[in-house]
Image (tube, rainbow, N blue to C red):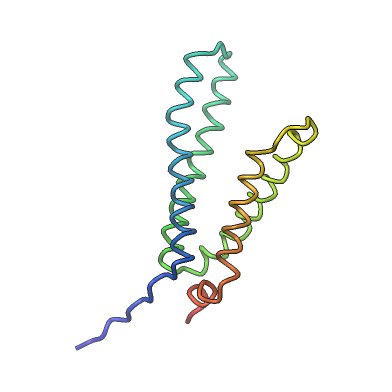
Amino acid sequence: MAQVAVRPAAPPVVKVVVIGLALLAVLNIVRAVVQVPYNLSHTSYGDAARILYVGLNAITVLFSLFVLLLAWFLWQGRQWAWITCMPLLGLAALWGGIMLLPPLVDGKFPGAGLTVLAVAVGMLLALTAPASARRFFTRR
């Protein structure tokens, strides 16, 4: 009988990151589905602004679908997904850092920027720091 190679299970730290990525992607899709019709029905946007608003949110939804797909392939231990996650999380951390600036200039607490920055850096460290995560993605 032919033996089927058994794929090792994802380490717990990878599972936490995958669940976090999937949850963020789903929440962003739900946000777009709920917020876009609400905003369009309660504001007086011009036609060009409506098209731009819907188009930008459509790009956000497509990116969230890509993140869901990426989370699935991370769960499967695909090295390309792991490598793709690194710059995406780095860009998210950069965006969180940029989001820190306006509230700090106004003397307010930068809650949103701090959250984005902390989550992105935490996920990046969780995918790179533990040896179990690195072994899971670099196994041959």
**Is 6 above or below relative to 11?**
below
- Give how far across and how far down residue 133 sits, in percent: 51, 71
Q: Which residue lies furthest to the bottom in this view?
A: 1
Residue farthest to the top, as pictured: 44
In the picture, residue 89 is in which quadrant?
bottom right
Residue at position x 48%, y 39% from top? 28
Q: Which residue is drawn at 38% across and 76% down?
A: 8
Query: Residue at the spot x=58%, y=13% of the render?
Result: 46
Q: In this view, does 22 lie above or below 61?
A: below
Q: Nearer the viewer, residue 96 or 47?
A: 96
Image-quadrant location for residue 53? top right
Q: Which residue lies furthest to the left in this view?
A: 1
| Number of numbered tags placed on the structure image | 0
Toward the right, the furthest residue is 105
Which part of the image, by quadrant, shows the N terminus? bottom left
Q: Where is residue 79 in the image (x, y as percent from the top left)?
A: 51, 69
On screen, residue 35 above or below 115: above
Q: In which quarter of the image is residue 102?
A: top right
Q: Foreground residue, 114 or 123?
A: 114
Where is residue 21? Give x, y as percent. 49, 52
- Please name the residue shown 47% across and 32% down the image: 32
